[in-house]
Image (cartoon, grey):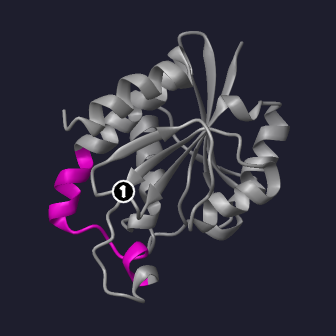
C-alpha cells in the first residue's frame, strides 16, 4: 500500500489554535474531520491515519513548535519509511494574499522558519502547499501578525480555502503533484 505523510505546520496549545501561523493545523483538522479520524498525541506530534482509495495517509501536526518542525518531519518520514516525494507540507505564507493557495513540488523555505528547519534536516525536494495569510501589518510587526488570530472577516475568506486545500491533498495523493499543480494553481491564479 502506498503511504503518504501529510504535514500541517503550526504551534501546539490553545493560545496558538486560532492564529495565522496555524493555518497548516487548520487544514489538517478539516481533513481529519472529513475523514472521521481523530488525532492522538504521539512522538513529536499529533498524528492520525486514514486511507484514501487504497493509499495510507499519515496526518501529522508537529508539536515541536514551528521553528523545530523538521524534527517531527524527519522522525515520521523515517519511522514510516516514506519518500519525500510522498510528503506534502501545508504551511501559512505571508507573501501570498489571504485566500490564495499555491502548490509547489519543491523550493526554498523563504522566510518561513518551519520550512527552514525542515530544509536543514531533509533538503528542499519535497512538495508544499502554501496558504496565503496576507501581510497587512506595519513594519516590524511580522511576529505579532503571524501569531495573531484571524479576524472574523478573514475567517469568512478562509473557510472555503481550507475546503479547497483538503481537495488538493486528496488530488495530490490520488493523481500526483504535477496534475494537481496544473489543475489547482491555474484555477486559483485565474481568479476562478
| Residue 174 coordinates in the image, percent (x, y) | 52, 15
Quadrant of residue 57 in the image? Answer: top right
User: Residue 46 vs residue 22: left or right?
Assistant: right
- Magenta-highlighted residues: 144-159
Name which residue lies at 42% across and 73% down: 146
Residue 17 visible to the viewer: no
Residue 112 visible to the viewer: yes
Name which residue lies at 15% across and 63% down: 153
Which corner quadrant holds the N terminus?
Answer: top right
| Residue 73 coordinates in the image, percent (x, y) | 72, 49
Which corner quadrant holds the C terminus?
Answer: top left
Q: Nearer the viewer, residue 58 or 9?
A: 9
Q: State whether the magenta stretch is mostly helix, strand or loop.
A: helix
User: Residue 31 vs residue 86: left or right?
Assistant: left
Q: Is residue 23 above or below residue 65?
A: above
Q: Nearer the viewer, residue 1 or 161?
A: 161
Q: Is residue 148 magenta?
A: yes
Residue that label 1 marks: 96
Amino acid at each position: 500500500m502506498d503511504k503518504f505523510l501529510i504535514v500541517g505546520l503550526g504551534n501546539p496549545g490553545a493560545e496558538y489554535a486560532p492564529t495565522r501561523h496555524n493555518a497548516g493545523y487548520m487544514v489538517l483538522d478539516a481533513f481529519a474531520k472529513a475523514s472521521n479520524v481523530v488525532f492522538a498525541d504521539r512522538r513529536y506530534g499529533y498524528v492520525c491515519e486514514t486511507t484514501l482509495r487504497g493509499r495510507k495517509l499519515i496526518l501529522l501536526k508537529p508539536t515541536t513548535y514551528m521553528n523545530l518542525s523538521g524534527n517531527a518531519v524527519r522522525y515520521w518520514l523515517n519511522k514510516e519509511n516514506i519518500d519525500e516525494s510522498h510528503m506534502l507540507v501545508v504551511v501559512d505564507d505571508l507573501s501570498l494574499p489571504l485566500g490564495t493557495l499555491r502548490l509547489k513540488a519543491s523550493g526554498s523555505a523563504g522566510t518561513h522558519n518551519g520550512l527552514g528547519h525542515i530544509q536543514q534536516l531533509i533538503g528542499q525536494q519535497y512538495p508544499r502547499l502554501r496558504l496565503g495569510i496576507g501581510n497587512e501589518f506595519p513594519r516590524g510587526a511580522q511576529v505579532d501578525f503571524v501569531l495573531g488570530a484571524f479576524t472574523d472577516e478573514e475567517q469568512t475568506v478562509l473557510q472555503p480555502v481550507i475546503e479547497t486545500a483538503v481537495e488538493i491533498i486528496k488530488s495530490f495523493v490520488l493523481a500526483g503533484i504535477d496534475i494537481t499543480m496544473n489543475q489547482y494553481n491555474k484555477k486559483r491564479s485565474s481568479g476562478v
